[in-house]
Amino acid sequence: MNSPSVSISWKRAIEIVLLNATMEFFNNSIYKIKWLLIFIKLSILSFCRKVLFQSKTLLLCCIVSYE
């Protein structure tokens, strides 16, 4: 019976499947983190634009009221 060689083949196959699953998990996690960072960056930029616009509007109101 060839049970030792079959056993070794199964162990190797299981190692390969687990390695692929682990690599896929971390690869997907990295992409999710990258998308999250892009979303945070865009949110911060949007917030800064709103603040800048409000500051310009406030400054313009001050100039108009001063005249």
Image: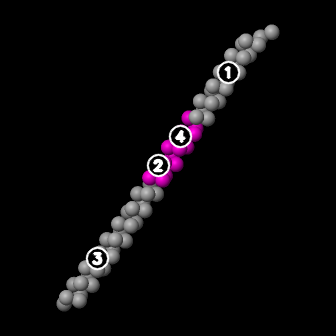
The answer to whether 26 appears left or right of 12 in the picture is left
Which of pointers 1 and 3 indicates the residue nearer the eye? 1
The answer to whether 10 appears left or right of 51 in the picture is right
Colouring convention used in this rendered image of the protein: one colour
Range of magenta residues? 23-37
Residue extending furthest toward the right: 1
The quarter of the rendered structure image containing the C terminus is: bottom left
Circle 4: element type: helix
Mark 3, Cα crowd under 10 Å, few <14 / some 14-19 / many 20+, is few
Mark sitting earlier along the chain (1/3): 1
The answer to whether 21 appears left or right of 49 in the picture is right
Mark 2, Cα crowd under 10 Å, few <14 / some 14-19 / many 20+, is few
- Within the image, what quadrant is residue 28 found in? top right
Circle 1: element type: helix
Q: Are marks 1 and 3 in contact (CB under 8 Å)?
A: no
**Residue under numbered circle 2:** 34
**Residue under numbered circle 3:** 56
As shown in the figure, which amino acid type bears the numbered disc 3?
Answer: Lys
Residue 32 on the magenta span: yes
